Amino acid sequence: MPLSPLDIHNKEFTRGFRGYAEDEVNEFLNQIIKDYEIILRDKRELEEKVKMMSEQIGHFNTLEDTLQKSIIVAQDAAEELRRNSQKEAKLIVKEAEKNADRIVNEALTKARKITIEIDELKKQSKVFRNRFKMLVEAQLDLLNTDDWEHLLEYDVALVDIQEQIRVGEDNEK
């Protein structure tokens, strides 16, 4: 067990013949007591500081553990968010590709229908052109016939026509 300042103070030495000078010993012991009290006080203060720092280290270790867990949770959340974003992006791209395919297919179908309609119109226009050409040629043939010359040579007087109308009316009665 360590000595206390009180132990040092109360220590009694036996007296011998020609012993040490009592005043010097007492003065030296008083100095040792003062120094020992300072050392003990410093020791208590240092122990309190060690205790306080140990508590702070415990607090900081707890805080560090919490921060590490928070970082892990944040990293996991970020990873999950990244994975979800990638999934969503893939779904969006897939949907866009479907829509693009549908739009292209609709456009191709419309283009085919229009091409068929154009071909049909071309056929109809050829048929119409040929019929119209035949009609015009037939009319030209009619114009080029001699029947027109015959009509121009035919001379009927107005009096003859009126006479024929009266005869026809009389016959009907």
Image (cartoon, rainbow, N blue to C red):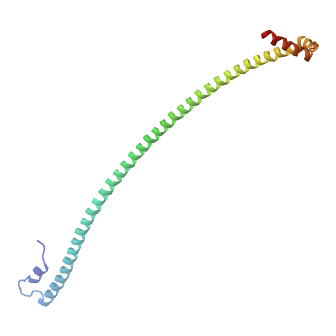
Report whether 144 appears left or right of 36: right
Quarter location, residue 60 = bottom left
Q: Quadrant of the C terminus?
A: top right
In this rendered view, identify the residue nearer to me: 132 or 27.
Answer: 132
Q: Residue furthest top?
A: 171
For image coordinates 49% across by 38% down, the residue present is 93
Q: Is residue 100 left or right of residue 154?
A: left
| Residue drawn at x 30%, y 60% as measured from the top left | 63
Q: Nearer the viewer, residue 153 or 18?
A: 153
| Placement of the N terminus among the 4 image quadrants | bottom left
Q: Nearer the viewer, residue 164 or 40?
A: 164
Q: Nearer the viewer, residue 35 or 71?
A: 71
For the point 77% across and 19% down, the residue is 132
Residue depicted at x 79% and y 15%:
134
- Res. 32 image quadrant: bottom left
Q: Residue 115: image x %, image y %?
A: 65, 25
Task: Estimate the x, y position of residue 13 in percent, counting from the top left.
Answer: 7, 83
Q: Is residue 156 left or right of residue 170?
A: right
Check the image and report above or below for 110 versus 91: above
In which image quadrant can residue 141 be found? top right
Report the label total.
Answer: 0
Residue 132 versus residue 45 in the image, above or below: above
Q: Outermost residue toward the bottom? A: 23
Q: Position of residue 82 (x, y in %)?
A: 42, 45
Residue 105 placement (x, y as % from top left): 56, 29
